Amino acid sequence: MKELVRSNDAVLISFVDALLNDAEIPHFVADSHMSILDGSIGVLPRRILVDPDHLIQARRILRDADLGHEISEMS
């Protein structure tokens, strides 16, 4: 799995998750339960991981949704 997005913004993570679900792109939202450790204040970022075979398509979907600036540099 490759990191597509890393963010503390729960709304952004939810939106990207919905976009990828609609496109039927295999992905995983990592660190979603880390808020237990940070006291639910959202300090620790969540990550969206994508199957490497679908990474280019996932990037394209984010760019089309004007979210290209949110794409992780690690991907």
Image: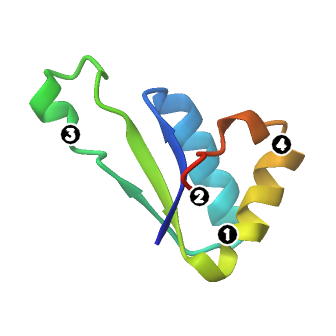
- Estimate the spatial distance between the alpha carbons at disc 3 and disc 4, rounded to whole Å: 27 Å
Disc 3: CA contacts within 10 A as few (<14), some (14-19) or many (>=20): some
Label 3: state its secondary structure.
loop
User: What's the amino acid at mark 4?
Assistant: Ala
Q: Quadrant of residue 54?
A: bottom right
Which residue occupies 59% across, 77% down?
52
Q: Residue at label 3?
A: 34
Which of disc 3 and disc 2 is earlier in sequence? 3
Name the residue that disc number 2 marks: 75
Q: Residue, x 57% and y 52% (percent of image)? A: 17
* Residue 62 image point, x, y percent: 76, 49
| Above or below, comparing residue 27 to residue 74 in the picture | below
Ranked by sequence position, the earlier of labels 2 and 1 is: 1
| For residue 42, above or below residue 7 | above
Label 4 or label 1, whichever lies nearer to me, is 1
Mark 4 lies on a secondary structure that is loop
Q: Residues within 10 Å of mark 4 (few under 14, many from 20)?
A: few
Return the x and y of residue 64 as percentages of the image width and height: 89, 48
How far apart marks 4 and 1 lie (CA) works out to: 15 Å
The tag earlier along the polypeptide, 3 or 1, is: 3
- The disc labelled 1 sits on which kind of residue? Leu
What separation in Å lies between label 3 and label 1 (alpha carbons)? 25 Å
Q: Quadrant of residue 66?
A: top right
| 67 sits to left or right of 35 | right
Element type where label 2 sits in the image = loop
> For the residues carrying marks 2 and 3, which lies nearer the camera in this image?
2
Mark whose residue sits in front, 3 or 1: 1
Q: Which residue does the numbered mark 1 point to in the structure image?
A: 55
Q: Single out the mark in the foreground, 2 or 4.
A: 2
Residue wearing tag 4: 65
Contact? badges 2 and 1 (CB < 8 Å)? yes
